Image: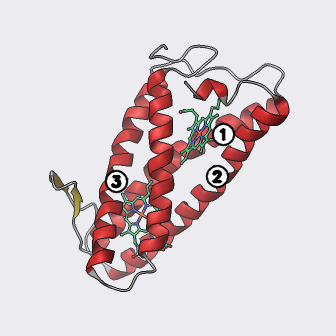
Amino acid sequence: MQLKNTQNRFGAIAMLLHWIMALIMIGMIILGLYMVTLPISLHKLKYYGWHKEWGVLILMLATVRLAWRFSNTVPSLPPQMPKWEQLAAHGMHYVFYGFMFALPITGWMLSSAAGLPVSFFGLFTLPDLIAASESSRLLLTQIHKWLAYGLIAAICGHVGAALQHHFFNKDDILRRMLP
Ligand code: HEM
Ligand code: HEM
């Protein structure tokens, strides 16, 4: 298997980043939605800590992934695919890149606004992005939550489209993102 993408399929690096990040981001949504419902406890704090460090990992992986995408060809979509669908697919991929950065950054900002540090697996602590402020914390929490809801909707559309291509159009859109 090739490391780099070709005109026809994604390479090993793009696939690895896609599936690892998909797994972590879906886990982050589930953990995020669950942890906010818990009463204040050591468990809740532990889950917040996990959510923050894995979220920072997403931010780092997103940077690597964006750099890799720009230094590679992106496999072209099947020529028989209508123009609007090609535009929608590409547009959606950019929206996903937006989520990969916007979610961790707003999460980091809302932690700073809450006056709480963000540690990266105990290795180092990230600097505060903004000053502590209750009004900023409330606003950023809302933005972070609605971004997450947007991500959930985008994932549903994206998975739906991938399955439609595989089972109805019977093209190799899904296969080319698989080893
Ligand atoms: C891909 C990355 C991320 C995703 C998908 C994500 C998703 C979520 C979700 C679904 C919630 C629950 C929202 C609610 O129902 O109120 C949440 C809450 C939260 N997230 Fe994230 N998050 C991400 C990254 C981060 C990062 C990097 C941080 C901090 C460094 C962070 C900090 C928080 C905090 C502190 C809350 C709780 C807010 C509250 O107490 O109301 N998140 N996140
Ligand atoms: C948080 C979850 C996900 C995110 C953020 C995401 C993001 C992306 C992005 C940005 C691309 C464009 C290629 C690239 O630049 O890397 C892509 C392609 C793709 N994704 Fe996802 N994805 C997610 C989950 C999934 C899941 C669960 C499936 C399972 C069906 C899936 C199937 C695909 C396929 C088949 C492609 C290739 C499309 C093509 O051939 O052009 N993705 N995804």
Q: Quarter of the image holding residue 45?
A: bottom left
Question: Ligand 1 sits in which quadrant?
Answer: bottom left
Residue 126: mark: none
Q: Which percent across, then down, holds residue 122?
A: 16, 56
User: x and y percent of residue 171 in the render?
Assistant: 77, 25
Residue located at (44% from left, 50% from top): 24
Q: CA distance from mark 1 to mark 3?
A: 26 Å
Residue holding disc 2 = 154
- Residue type at the position of mark 3: Trp
Of the pair 103 and 34, the residue shown nearer to us: 34
Asked if disc 2 is less than 8 Å from ligand 2, the answer is: yes
Name the front one of labels 1 and 2. Answer: 2
Please tell me which residue is depicted at 53% across the width and 18% down the height of the picture: 5
Task: Find residue 168 and report its horizontal and vertical position in percent.
Answer: 84, 35
Query: Is residue 147 placed above or below 163 in the rendered structure?
Result: below
Q: Secondary structure at mark 1?
A: helix
Residue 4 horizontal side relative to residue 39, left or right: right
